[in-house]
Amino acid sequence: GSKLPDAQAAHESANTLWPTILGGVNFCLHAAGWLEGGLVSSYEKFIIDADQLTMFQRFAEGVDFSENGQALEAMRERNATGEAHFLATAHTRANFETAFWRSGITDNNSYEQWRDDGEKDQSVRANATWKKMLADYEAPALDQGLDEQLQAFMAKRKEVLPDGVS
Protein backbone atom coordinates (compact mmCIF):
# COMPACT_ATOMS: atom_id res chain seq x y z
CA GLY A 1 0.00 0.00 0.00
CA SER A 2 2.97 2.39 0.16
CA LYS A 3 2.74 5.40 -2.13
CA LEU A 4 6.51 6.00 -2.30
CA PRO A 5 9.62 3.81 -2.55
CA ASP A 6 10.18 4.22 1.19
CA ALA A 7 10.70 2.02 4.25
CA GLN A 8 7.06 0.89 4.16
CA ALA A 9 7.47 -0.20 0.53
CA ALA A 10 10.66 -2.07 1.40
CA HIS A 11 8.95 -3.88 4.27
CA GLU A 12 6.00 -4.79 2.08
CA SER A 13 8.29 -6.21 -0.61
CA ALA A 14 10.44 -8.14 1.84
CA ASN A 15 7.42 -9.54 3.67
CA THR A 16 6.06 -10.76 0.34
CA LEU A 17 9.31 -12.06 -1.10
CA TRP A 18 10.52 -14.07 1.90
CA PRO A 19 7.57 -16.48 1.85
CA THR A 20 7.75 -16.57 -1.95
CA ILE A 21 11.39 -17.70 -1.84
CA LEU A 22 10.95 -20.01 1.14
CA GLY A 23 7.90 -21.56 -0.53
CA GLY A 24 10.05 -22.58 -3.48
CA VAL A 25 8.46 -20.35 -6.12
CA ASN A 26 10.74 -20.31 -9.15
CA PHE A 27 8.91 -17.66 -11.19
CA CYS A 28 7.19 -14.58 -9.83
CA LEU A 29 5.87 -12.19 -12.46
CA HIS A 30 5.12 -9.21 -10.23
CA ALA A 31 8.14 -9.07 -7.96
CA ALA A 32 9.43 -5.56 -8.55
CA GLY A 33 8.33 -1.97 -8.87
CA TRP A 34 4.85 -2.08 -7.37
CA LEU A 35 3.44 0.62 -5.14
CA GLU A 36 -0.05 1.28 -3.81
CA GLY A 37 -1.03 -2.38 -3.90
CA GLY A 38 -0.03 -2.76 -7.54
CA LEU A 39 -1.94 0.26 -8.82
CA VAL A 40 1.26 2.18 -9.53
CA SER A 41 4.66 1.17 -10.84
CA SER A 42 7.79 3.09 -9.89
CA TYR A 43 11.13 2.98 -11.67
CA GLU A 44 12.90 3.73 -8.39
CA LYS A 45 11.03 0.94 -6.59
CA PHE A 46 11.81 -1.38 -9.49
CA ILE A 47 15.55 -0.71 -9.12
CA ILE A 48 15.37 -1.17 -5.33
CA ASP A 49 13.37 -4.38 -5.64
CA ALA A 50 15.59 -5.77 -8.41
CA ASP A 51 18.58 -5.16 -6.16
CA GLN A 52 16.90 -7.05 -3.33
CA LEU A 53 15.91 -9.84 -5.71
CA THR A 54 19.61 -10.44 -6.40
CA MET A 55 20.02 -11.05 -2.66
CA PHE A 56 17.06 -13.44 -2.63
CA GLN A 57 18.52 -15.25 -5.64
CA ARG A 58 21.81 -15.64 -3.80
CA PHE A 59 19.95 -16.95 -0.73
CA ALA A 60 18.00 -19.44 -2.87
CA GLU A 61 21.24 -20.89 -4.23
CA GLY A 62 21.68 -22.50 -0.83
CA VAL A 63 24.82 -23.33 1.10
CA ASP A 64 27.91 -24.21 -0.90
CA PHE A 65 29.19 -27.45 0.61
CA SER A 66 32.16 -27.75 -1.73
CA GLU A 67 35.67 -27.66 -0.34
CA ASN A 68 36.02 -24.07 -1.53
CA GLY A 69 32.59 -23.08 -0.21
CA GLN A 70 33.43 -24.39 3.24
CA ALA A 71 36.90 -22.80 3.19
CA LEU A 72 38.59 -26.06 4.12
CA GLU A 73 41.90 -25.00 2.57
CA ALA A 74 41.83 -21.79 4.62
CA MET A 75 41.35 -23.84 7.78
CA ARG A 76 44.24 -26.13 6.88
CA GLU A 77 46.45 -23.14 6.02
CA ARG A 78 45.54 -21.31 9.22
CA ASN A 79 46.21 -24.40 11.32
CA ALA A 80 49.60 -24.90 9.63
CA THR A 81 50.70 -21.29 10.15
CA GLY A 82 49.16 -20.79 13.58
CA GLU A 83 47.50 -17.52 12.52
CA ALA A 84 44.71 -16.27 14.77
CA HIS A 85 42.52 -15.25 11.81
CA PHE A 86 41.71 -16.18 8.21
CA LEU A 87 42.28 -12.79 6.59
CA ALA A 88 45.76 -13.61 5.29
CA THR A 89 44.91 -17.01 3.81
CA ALA A 90 45.05 -17.61 0.06
CA HIS A 91 41.42 -18.75 0.17
CA THR A 92 40.26 -15.46 1.69
CA ARG A 93 42.21 -13.44 -0.86
CA ALA A 94 40.77 -15.52 -3.71
CA ASN A 95 37.15 -15.35 -2.50
CA PHE A 96 36.58 -12.16 -0.54
CA GLU A 97 35.12 -10.19 -3.46
CA THR A 98 32.53 -12.81 -4.40
CA ALA A 99 31.82 -14.64 -1.14
CA PHE A 100 29.06 -12.34 0.03
CA TRP A 101 26.13 -10.62 -1.65
CA ARG A 102 26.62 -6.89 -2.07
CA SER A 103 23.91 -4.44 -2.95
CA GLY A 104 24.48 -2.31 -5.98
CA ILE A 105 22.54 0.68 -4.64
CA THR A 106 23.05 0.88 -0.90
CA ASP A 107 25.39 3.43 0.67
CA ASN A 108 27.74 1.95 3.24
CA ASN A 109 29.87 5.04 3.71
CA SER A 110 30.15 6.94 6.97
CA TYR A 111 27.50 9.49 7.86
CA GLU A 112 29.95 12.29 7.17
CA GLN A 113 30.81 10.98 3.71
CA TRP A 114 27.12 10.41 2.90
CA ARG A 115 26.35 13.96 4.05
CA ASP A 116 29.22 15.43 2.04
CA ASP A 117 28.13 13.46 -1.05
CA GLY A 118 24.71 15.15 -1.01
CA GLU A 119 22.67 13.14 1.55
CA LYS A 120 21.19 10.92 -1.16
CA ASP A 121 18.70 8.38 0.12
CA GLN A 122 18.09 5.09 -1.65
CA SER A 123 15.26 6.48 -3.78
CA VAL A 124 17.53 9.22 -5.10
CA ARG A 125 20.28 6.69 -5.85
CA ALA A 126 17.74 4.39 -7.54
CA ASN A 127 16.48 7.32 -9.63
CA ALA A 128 20.01 7.99 -10.86
CA THR A 129 20.50 4.27 -11.55
CA TRP A 130 17.45 3.82 -13.79
CA LYS A 131 18.18 7.05 -15.64
CA LYS A 132 21.76 5.92 -16.30
CA MET A 133 20.53 2.50 -17.42
CA LEU A 134 18.07 4.12 -19.83
CA ALA A 135 20.68 6.56 -21.16
CA ASP A 136 23.22 3.75 -21.65
CA TYR A 137 20.74 1.37 -23.30
CA GLU A 138 21.66 0.13 -26.76
CA ALA A 139 18.94 -1.67 -28.68
CA PRO A 140 20.06 -5.11 -29.81
CA ALA A 141 20.70 -5.60 -33.49
CA LEU A 142 17.65 -6.73 -35.44
CA ASP A 143 17.81 -8.43 -38.80
CA GLN A 144 16.56 -5.95 -41.43
CA GLY A 145 14.23 -8.52 -43.02
CA LEU A 146 12.70 -9.44 -39.69
CA ASP A 147 12.27 -5.77 -38.81
CA GLU A 148 10.43 -5.17 -42.09
CA GLN A 149 8.15 -8.14 -41.44
CA LEU A 150 7.37 -6.92 -37.94
CA GLN A 151 6.69 -3.38 -39.15
CA ALA A 152 4.33 -4.73 -41.85
CA PHE A 153 2.54 -6.92 -39.31
CA MET A 154 2.05 -4.00 -36.92
CA ALA A 155 0.80 -1.74 -39.72
CA LYS A 156 -1.71 -4.38 -40.79
CA ARG A 157 -2.96 -4.89 -37.21
CA LYS A 158 -3.33 -1.13 -36.69
CA GLU A 159 -5.56 -0.96 -39.76
CA VAL A 160 -8.07 -3.39 -38.22
CA LEU A 161 -8.04 -2.08 -34.66
CA PRO A 162 -11.45 -0.65 -33.84
CA ASP A 163 -10.11 2.60 -32.39
CA GLY A 164 -7.67 3.21 -35.25
CA VAL A 165 -4.81 4.03 -32.86
CA SER A 166 -1.57 4.41 -34.71
Image (spheres, grey):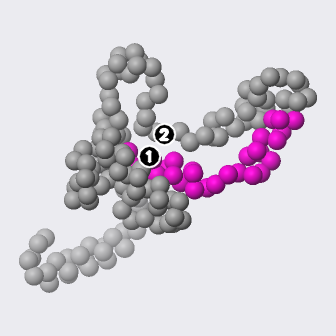
Structural distance between the alpha carbons of marks 2 and 1: 6 Å
Frontmost residue, 98 versus 148: 98
The quadrant of the image that shows the C terminus is bottom left
Within-10-Å neighbours for mark 2: few <14, some 14–19, many 20+: few
**Any magenta on residue 72?**
yes
Frontmost residue, 128 versus 76: 76
Magenta-drawn stretch, dominant element (helix, strand or loop): helix
Mark yes or no: residue 134 visible.
no
Dot 1 corresponds to which residue?
51
Name the quadrant containing residue 70.
Answer: top right
Q: Identify residue type, mark 1.
A: Asp
Looking at the picture, how far across and down is residue 57, in whole percent? 53, 54
Looking at the picture, how far across and down is residue 110, in whole percent? 45, 20
Of pointers 2 and 1, the one earlier in the residue sequence: 1
Frontmost residue, 136 versus 58: 58
Looking at the picture, how far across and down is residue 99, in whole percent? 65, 40
Which residue does the image show at 43% across and 64% down from the upper left? 28
Which residue does the image show at 35% across and 35% down from the upper left? 122
Dot 2 corresponds to which residue?
103
Give the magenta part as a residue range: 48-76
Looking at the picture, how far across and down is residue 24, in whole percent? 54, 65
**Any magenta on residue 10?**
no
